[in-house]
Amino acid sequence: MQLNLEPKIEDPDGFYNQLICLHDGLSEEESLELQSRMILLLANHIGDSEVLSEVMRIAREPFEK
Amino acid sequence: MPYEYPKFKYRRSPDQDTADPVRHPVVITGAGPVGLALAIDLALKQVPVVLLEALDTISVGSRAICFAKRTLEVCERLGLGGRLLEKGVTWKKGKVFFGEDEVYEFDLLPEDGHQFPAFINLQQYYIELYAIERAQELQEFIDLRWCSELRGINYGENEVHLTVGTPDSIYQLDCDWLIAADGARSFCRKTLGLEFEGRTFDDQFLIADIKTKADMPPVRRFWFAPTFTDADSALLHMQPDDVWRLDFQIGPKADAVKEMQIEKVMSRVRGMLGDEIEPDLEWISVYRFQSRCIRNFRHGRVIFSGDAAHQVSPFGARGANSGIQDAENLAWKLQLVLKELAPESLLDSYNSERIYAAEENIRHSTQSTDFIAPKGTVSLAYRNAVLSLAKQYKFARPLINSGRLSTPTIHLESTLNTADIDSWLGKLSPGAPAADAPLQTPKGECWLLSQLKGDFTLLYFTDGSVPEDVEAELRRLSENAVLVKPLVIGLNSESQGVSLFDLQGLAALRYDARNGTTYLLRPDQHITARWKRFATDAVRKALKRVTCN
């Protein structure tokens, strides 16, 4: 399977807002755990290790020299 | 009453009174589980061994307590399996808690039709005691020297010169091969100036082995972030004699001396088990651990095994279990080299196979450590996310790592293997240990692995009678310089000229066997080659390959 990099999110503004509001009232530590929970849920849904490796590679791109 | 350690008497060796150093084929230093297993294995192959032990007693404290199925199978071949199984606590269930919450319960789900369970718990001193008694039965070949401390090593191309210190003299000893089984603080390793590579961890762990009649099931219980004590994790595990292993992760900054004070230990024990508990404290210890190994296990005529060569965190029980696999891997290779039936390069396969195993064990135990003792806020957040999801959502449960329990290393990449040419179903492969299965004999049931007694074995499955050409080759192999014992299994009760039958069909299933299926097994019971159809040339070629001839 290949990582889909075409725009796919149905309601971009709504989704983005939802993502930000999700952290309302949480400490930084709690936010970090929430994000971890989300990533784990999404990663399991994807499952495919090639796709997951590609996600990780792109996520780290700006920090690689 | 805590366990009473037997004392073994120092006896002066005739080697101490000779003008010139006496030369022995094999000297092993360290009479722990690994050194003893190797000595017994060599003795069963009629190789004489001198086993040097600096102390006059066995392991103080329970130390290694979890022995895996493969270890029990090896020990069975050495003549110890039954005693270990009888004394040990067989367990298969584990519970994982996060804070006060039970997150999930696992079952190691051992498959039916194996002689030994997935795990037993047994104090290290029992395995050592039983092995010493076995070594005494084999004293024709095992010269076990107590209070004999290796103090000097000088090795040349063809021999090793040793200096041994005893209560009444220092003497010289020569050997063809020196096997270092002298543990984590190996004198041999230091003397040869070998550096460990790997990681050390700052966290400290407190072990309290307690004796109590409290009525609790033999379930491994592991707490992440327990609320009953100020430790980052805690473990409770049953041992024989009403002894329980309690293990607390007390952090990098804890004061070890204070932590070992009885009142402090008791407050942790009562936190876990309740205020009413009145246990005897059998053993208290604070430890840190490393995950690391030396780069080469063979240095000329000095060969390293067990903790002297590699160390892992205790999570997963991969220390003693992998050390015993080192011993079984080394014994037959050393025997063939000593008998000049194989070149010394066979010993390099010990190095490559067991380094591969050590790396696998280090990887698993390091990953467990990173989960149990996460470093940094992100690691901790992920760890807690996994645990908080796992109770309700089972997808997260495989991510929980409270120790991946020891399984035997499959030497997939070993150069001794002959690659498969046929296609096979099932879990076996060249490099894997042979699978057990129940077999029927005219006298009753027996186990397949119990038929593999430490020689090469040609395992042949038949549904009728054994063809003449196969029979002739089996006979020839059993008279070969490198002995190959035939083991013929009848696939049904009509099989002719056979005394072992696979009437339940489990051997056929596990070995994906049909009429004519042939496996060549190493003396350590690992598969080295297999064919769907018997072919003399292929068998001979595989035998040459596995002996480096």
Image (cartoon, coloured by chain):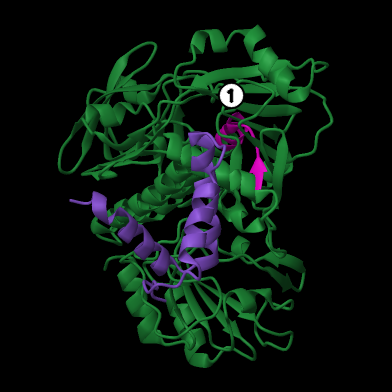
Q: Position of residue B323 (x, y in %)?
A: 45, 43
In this view, B74 is above or below B88: below
Quarter of the image with the N terminus of chain B in it: top right
Q: Position of residue B386 (x, y in %)?
A: 57, 47
For label 1, the SS is: loop
Q: Is residue A58 left or right of residue B203?
A: left
Magenta span includes B126: yes
The quadrant in which residue B86 appears is top right
Residue shown at the point (36%, 71%) measured from the top left: A5
Magenta span includes B277: no
- Residue B404 visible in the shown view: no
Mark 1 belongs to which amino acid?
Ala
Q: Specify the colour of chain B.
A: green
Quarter of the image with the C terminus of chain B in it: bottom left
- In this view, the residue farthest toward the left is B157
Residue shown at the point (58%, 24%) measured from the top left: B231
Which residue bears the numbered disc 1? B231
Q: Is residue B304 left or right of residue B301?
A: right
Query: For mark 1, does the 10 Å Cα neighbourhood hold few (<14), some (14 to 19), or many (20 or more) residues?
Result: some
**Magenta segment boundaries in residue numbering:** B119-132
In this view, B262 is above or below B50: above
Query: Tag 1, which chain?
Result: B
In this view, B189 is above or below B208: below
Q: Specify the colour of chain A.
A: purple
